[in-house]
DNA sequence: ACAATTTATGATCCAGGGGTCATATGCGGT
DNA sequence: ACCGCATATGACCCCTGGATCATAAATTGT
């Protein structure tokens, strides 16, 4: 699954989805990532202003990766989840 | 060009590279993105703690995109720039 | 419907980010 | 070596994110 992320809300969705896919509770993810459960809740719900490092911690714990590329020109291949 | 981003430093490199590729000065990028030149300087040099929104602003101005995917298992295809 | 677990909300505190301005340092061109 | 633009640094203030704790609300299982 590939998530195009343009907003905090997008990111929140991607993280929640990945967490659910691994059957983790926020609390579990919290203890694996070092990010508080309350903070995870806010992030998953797209509350903005999150710090990059916090995101990196979650991404790492969820075994995801972030890539930055040139914006795809043509028609997107339709397989991404774009929130 | 594809940048795997795990740290603020990675992000900084990706942004600087994209800016250079478009022949923009930090000041120009600043006025196009609404992010201060001084802040861009810090981000490009990998100073941590940046807020997500700031990054999104820069990414958008540079016509880049961020994607979140499952961490690639096997051998990376060797074509990415991994800082 | 209830109990237990999970998630959200609310408040407090503190550190640090980013806006802002001034200035210093760096660097390309001649 | 000098000049001008580019980038970096430093200081200040304000605001907000995240740690932390308590608790409310929602969800899940039986």
Image (cartoon, coloured by chain):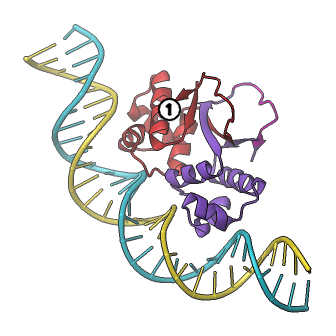
Chain colours: A purple, B red, C cyan, D yellow
- Please check the rendered image and state whether residue A63 is part of the magenta-colored stretch, yes or no: no
Q: Is residue D29 left or right of residue B63?
A: right
Q: Is residue A2 left or right of residue B49?
A: right
Looking at the picture, does residue C20 appear above or below residue A29?
A: above
Give the x, y percent position of residue A24.
72, 61
Asked if the stretch drawn in magenta spans residue A80, the answer is yes
Q: Nearer the viewer, residue A52 or B76?
A: B76
The spot of residue A43 in percent (x, y) is 62, 60
Q: Quadrant of the N terminus of chain B?
A: top right
Residue at the spot 69% in from the left edge and 25% down from the top edge: A73
Range of residues picked out in magenta: A73-81
Please determine whether, in this image, residue D3 is positioned above or below residue A80.
above
Total number of numbered discs in the rendering: 1
> With B83 as the anchor, is A18 left or right in this view?
right
Q: Residues within 10 Å of mark 1 (few under 14, many from 20)?
A: many
Q: Who's the residue at 46% across and 32% down the image?
A: B13
Q: Please give the residue where the numbered disc 1 appears in the rendered image.
A: B14
Magenta residues, dominant SS class: loop
């Amino acid at each position: 699954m590939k998530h195009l992320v343009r907003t905090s809300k997008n990111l929140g969705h991607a993280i929640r989805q990945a967490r659910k896919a691994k059957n983790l509770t926020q609390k579990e993810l919290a203890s694996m990532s070092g990010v508080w459960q309350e903070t995870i809740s806010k992030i998953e719900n797209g509350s903005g202003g999150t710090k990059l490092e916090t995101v990196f911690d979650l991404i790492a714990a969820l075994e995801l990766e972030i890539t930055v590329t040139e914006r795809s020109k043509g028609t997107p291949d339709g397989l991404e989840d774009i929130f």
